[in-house]
Image (cartoon, rainbow, N blue to C red):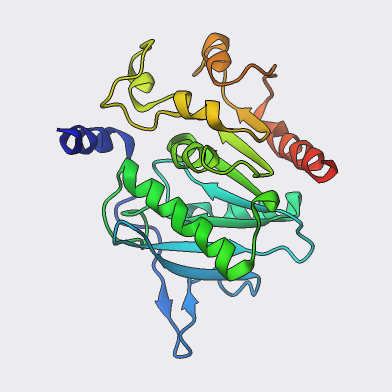
Amino acid sequence: MGNVTSSVAAKFAFFPPDPPTYDIYREEDGRLVFPGVTADKNVDVHLLDTKGGNKIVAMLWRHPFARFTLLYSHGNAADLGQMHELFIELRAHLRVNIMSYDYSGYGASTGKPSELNTYYDIEAVYNCLKSEYGIKQEDLILYGQSVGSGPTVHLASRFQKLRGVVLHSAILSGIRVLYPVKMTFWFDIFKNIDKIRNVSCPVLVIHVSIFLSCQNFNSLSNSPFVYIPKELYILVLIYFLSAAYTN
């Protein structure tokens, strides 16, 4: 029964671009190439195996003076081909490495998108950062946008030494996107509202006020929050990272 409800929920949660907006291929030397992007010598492309048996695309955007790495989980209706300009801008303004990836079933990643697969996906990306680049929890900031808040909160609830978490247009849970229910049902997906209690690092919540009320925000955090215009988005992230540098 659980698999059936998860499959139904996935139809409402995931909208991968069809057809995908990019493809990758291997050079003769074995190097993975993302056309139009890997000309940037500070970009590494990976094809990672997940516990779900899928292969997902991950890209590390390196900054020469970065102290921290941002692990970015994107929204439900985009793939990496649509996101790379944002990553270039964030890398330049924030002076961080950015690890981006496509969920199973998105872009050139194999398999089908599901809640469980997103958890396997982000775990594979984290393991890559740890084994290939020696990234420590203390130097890692998780960033989750929209449905990406699910795998982000999932991973953050398991690791206690992360530098920080950014939740951008986060969801409380799958069902709560559709109905303002007070309790969590067993068939719900992305139960962020319950898992957030186990996140011990600093959390920055960025959300459009018309989508989530103050009362609901308080369910996610007891900390005060401020609404900001989208033009200040980069500045707020810079402020958040500046605070991380000084701690």
At 65% from the left and 44% from the top, the residue drawn is 161
At 64% from the left and 60% from the top, the residue drawn is 135
Indicate whether 163 appears above or below 80: above
Is 32 or 224 nearer to us in this picture? 224
Give the percent coordinates (x, y) of residue 139.
Answer: 70, 52
Give the percent coordinates (x, y) of residue 35.
Answer: 48, 72
Q: Kindly tell me whether residue 100 is visible in this rendering.
A: yes
In the displayed structure image, the side of residue 51 where residue 58 appears, left or right: right
Is 28 or 229 nearer to us in this picture? 28
At 58% from the left and 62% from the top, the residue drawn is 130
In the displayed structure image, the side of residue 36 where residue 8 appears, left or right: left
Using the rendered view, name the quadrant where residue 65 is placed. Answer: bottom right
Is 160 or 35 nearer to us in this picture? 160
Quarter holding the C terminus?
A: top right
Quarter holding the N terminus?
A: top left
Using the rendered view, name the quadrant where residue 187 is placed. Answer: top left
Indicate whether 228 appears above or below 11: above
Is 136 or 56 nearer to us in this picture? 136
Using the rendered view, name the quadrant where residue 68 is placed. Answer: bottom right
